[in-house]
Amino acid sequence: MPAAGSGSRSGLAQPKQYAEIAGRSVIEWSLQPFLDDPRCQGLMVALAPDDTRFANLGLPSAGARLRHCAGGARRCDSVLAALQALPAAAGDWVLVHDAARPCVTTADIDSLLAALQGHATGGLLAVPLSDTLKRADGANEVLATLPREGLWRALTPQMFRFGPLRDALEKALRSGVQPTDEAQALELAGLRPALVAGSPQNIKITTEHDLALAARILQARRSES
């Protein structure tokens, strides 16, 4: 789990992963489904070197399975640092999940695991695009309307074998490319990750509006349970 970002674009007073929603921090919500899953043998969180908040979180169910390491300036650096700190074998499955995605469900994780167990490469949760897409110029005027057929919005978790993912990230960074997600690193290595349909409620916190929406989603689930 990459969690070393400062969240400077969010406009929040603290990194977005530590903002509070529905009584817990964003990162606690993001970690909990994996802490609750007995199939998850361990978790590695990549933190900023000066992070003082993570150690004070209330994660009583974590135990020795939850570890952390120093992350990097970019998401891809943090993911690679976490992989390099993992005591994993090349063929082990690894899931990478954003610390700022607090609304992932066990059902989505189950779907991902079931769909990819026999896949040669692995893949990611994603949502097919349904909105009309516009390309804009520098003045925010429409240049073109783009076809949305075959386009998906990438989510996390993303699930790949440990060795190929680590090698693909290392190769991309050596070549000067900064993959924006793990799937892109595998694509650059010539592989074809699978897309697994996920819930559109699995949102990523970027702004205060996202925080409010995530809070409503989580509170609604509490009311239903």
Image (spheres, grey):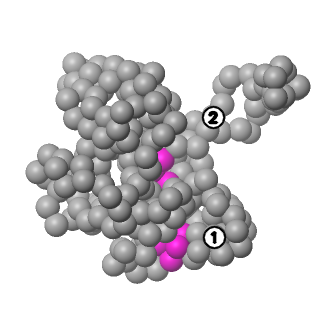
Q: In this picture, is 223 found above or below 37?
A: above
Q: Amino acid at mark 1?
A: Leu
Q: Amino acid at mark 2?
A: Pro
Which residue is at a point 20% across and 29% down the rendered structure image?
23
Q: Left of 27 or right of it: where is 148?
A: right
Q: Left of 174 or right of it: where is 2?
A: left
Q: What mark, if any, has residue 173 been given in the picture? A: 1
Q: In this picture, is 213 found above or below 121?
A: above
Magenta stretch contains residue 159: yes
Tell me how far mark 1 sits from mark 2, CA to CA. 29 Å
Residue pointed to by mark 2: 128
The range drawn in magenta is 156-166
Q: Position of residue 83 (x, y in %)?
A: 43, 71
Q: Nearer the viewer, residue 161 or 7?
A: 7
Mark yes or no: residue 102 visible. no
Q: Nearer the viewer, mark 1 or mark 2?
A: 1
Quadrant position of the C terminus in the picture? top left
Q: Dot 1, crowdedness within 10 Å: few (<14), some or many (≥20)? A: some
Quadrant position of the N terminus in the picture? bottom left
Which residue is at a point 59% across and 74% down the rendered structure image?
170
